[in-house]
Image (cartoon, rainbow, N blue to C red):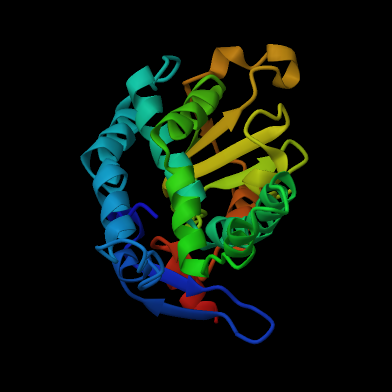
């Protein structure tokens, strides 16, 4: 996830059936990556993908994202805050975050095995029986999980495909939900920070609902005070166009809490809590 000063204090370990909630103090930078998760022996440099992500996307979480946060914070009301350049930066961050998380990559790596088996059968069925040697080589061909993960990463970050994903969400309506009760209930984030949901407020996988689905809603907190919401232009018959790119002040505790629940539910391991929420929870647990 993007590592910034806003979430350096509180980190809670996601509770599961075999693991209780645990609060501890650390830096986001220390836990934002799963150690060696992106390592691959397929490449000459095992750290190829870690370096690729850092060079092409994590740098956007530095000055480019901080400048957008400052711009939103200081902007007067009733103006369009986000420029096309801002949306381009955010779109690249959002898509890269969504397809680099273990939930997505592990699912696609498993699916790659099924697709490769079907593809291999299709090739074998297309070759005449006289191609005995070739048929034998193809039938014995296997791909390790490491090789399949590298295939998935290569396909997902293909420049043309990635740009197409970004263009899809840039054409949607972008709402900025500015949290006026940040000191009481801030937006939290996690190691899987981009939420794909629907207008029915049900968390879904990006691969299930799709970017082009008019019911798809993308939520991405970029600070404890700022949530980016991306909606279809057709939603509510286009009546929300006047809010596109604008900052809207939110003090609805239910709305903010529901967003935080969605973020917590889909986290991989860690949920990142800013102060003073972290200290409040630590006193009560």
Looking at the image, which residue is at 60% across and 59% down?
Answer: 138
The quarter in which the C terminus is drawn is: bottom right
- Does residue 112 lie above or below 28 as drawn? above
| Residue 14 in picture, x, y percent from top left | 56, 73
| Residue 231 rendering spot, x and y as whole percentages | 62, 28
- Which is nearer the eye, 146 or 88? 146
Residue occupying the point 52% across, 47% down: 194
Compared to residue 223, the image places residue 274 above or below, namely below
Image quarter of residue 57: top left
* Residue 176 x %, y %: 49, 31
Kindly tell me whether residue 279 is visible in this rendering: yes
The answer to whether one can see residue 83 in this image is no
> Residue at point 43% right, 70% down?
11
In the picture shown, does residue 4 fall above or below 246?
below
Residue 241 occupies quadrant? top right
Q: Nearer the viewer, residue 63 or 166?
A: 166
Q: Quadrant of residue 226?
A: top left
Which is nearer the eye, 170 or 240?
A: 170
Residue at the limit of the structure toward the left, as seen here: 63
- Residue found 57% across the figure and 22% down from its top: 172
């Amino acid at each position: 996830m993007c590592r910034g000063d806003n979430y350096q204090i509180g980190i809670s370990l996601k509770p599961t059936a075999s693991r209780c909630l645990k609060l501890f103090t650390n830096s986001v930078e220390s836990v934002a990556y799963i150690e060696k998760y992106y390592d691959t022996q397929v490449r000459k440099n095992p750290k190829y993908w870690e370096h690729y992500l850092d060079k092409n996307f994590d740098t956007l979480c530095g000055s480019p994202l901080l400048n957008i946060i400052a711009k939103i914070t200081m902007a007067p009301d009733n103006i369009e805050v986000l420029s096309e350049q801002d949306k381009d930066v955010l779109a690249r961050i959002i898509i890269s975050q969504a397809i680099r998380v273990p939930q997505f990559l592990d699912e696609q790596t498993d699916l790659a095995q099924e697709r490769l088996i079907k593809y291999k059968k299709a090739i074998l069925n297309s070759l005449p029986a006289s191609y005995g040697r070739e048929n034998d080589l193809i039938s014995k061909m296997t791909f390790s999980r490491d090789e399949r993960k590298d295939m998935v990463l290569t396909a997902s970050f293909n420049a043309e495909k990635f740009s197409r994903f970004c263009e899809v969400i840039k054409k949607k309506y972008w709402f900025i939900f500015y949290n006026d009760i940040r000191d009481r209930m801030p937006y939290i984030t996690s190691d899987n920070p981009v939420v794909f949901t629907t207008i029915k407020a049900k968390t879904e996988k990006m691969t299930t609902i799709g970017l082009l689905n008019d019911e798809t809603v993308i939520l991405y907190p970029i600070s404890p005070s700022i949530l980016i919401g991306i909606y279809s232009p057709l939603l509510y018959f286009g009546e929300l166009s006047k809010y596109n790119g604008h900052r809207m002040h939110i003090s609805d505790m239910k709305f903010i809490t529901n967003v935080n629940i969605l973020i917590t539910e889909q986290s991989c391991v860690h949920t990142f809590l800013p102060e003073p929420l972290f200290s409040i929870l630590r006193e009560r647990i």
